[in-house]
Amino acid sequence: MTIERVGVAFEPDILKKFDRLLKGSGYMSRSEALRDLARKAILDSEVKEGKGIVIGTITIIYDHHASNVTERLLDLQHHHHADVISTMHVHASEKMCLEVIVVRGESAEVRRLSDSIRAVKGVKHGELVITKTGL
Ligand code: NI
């Protein structure tokens, strides 16, 4: 991969705080940290515009005693425009289930599926994490 070098000017106090942050988070160089920040900004902007195919996870925790929750969740995963690639189910406690759903599709569709899943009665908490290959 070709790399282009650019010079970046910082105010000293920002640079000091940034370096402190990097030290704590395990980055070996400022360049690597800045590249990751740039990738994140590009990804966020593309996802916000609903552009392109993304891959991600929807992690939910739900009460499996809630009425029809399992059927509702299965139904949503089977009949949606985003593809569910894989799911992992963990019986987290006697009452609660943790599920990680891996999805791929147009970012707007993935978001819609995640919203529908989180809105199911019995789902207590859910988070969508989206990323892209080729970043
Ligand atoms: Ni379970």
Image (spheres, rainbow, N blue to C red):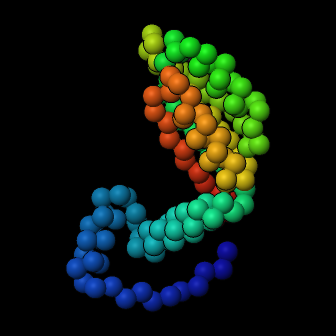
Is residue 14 or residue 81 the one in the foreground?
81
Tell me if residue 70 comes above or below residue 100 in the rendering. above
Q: Residue at x 52, y 31 (%)?
A: 60
Q: Residue at x 41, y 71 (%)?
A: 29
Tell me if residue 125 comes above or below residue 105 in the rendering. above
Q: Quadrant of the N terminus?
A: bottom right
Tell me if residue 34 comes above or below residue 62 in the rendering. below
Instruction: Determine the image quadrant of residue 39.
Output: bottom right
Tell me if residue 75 comes above or below residue 68 in the rendering. below
Count of residue discs: 0
Q: Quadrant of the C terminus?
A: bottom right
Is residue 65 or residue 10 the one in the foreground?
65
Q: Is residue 84 visible?
A: yes
**Image location (x, y in percent) of residue 129:** 55, 47
**Image location (x, y in percent) of residue 26:** 37, 58
Q: Residue at x 52, y 15 (%)?
A: 66
Q: Is 106 displayed left or right of 125 in the figure? A: right
**Image location (x, y in percent) of residue 96:** 47, 18
Q: Is 81 displayed left or right of 49 in the figure? A: right
Q: Is residue 32 visible?
A: no
Is residue 39 or residue 80 the one in the foreground?
80
**Image location (x, y in percent) of residue 62:** 50, 23
Q: Residue at x 45, y 13 (%)?
A: 95
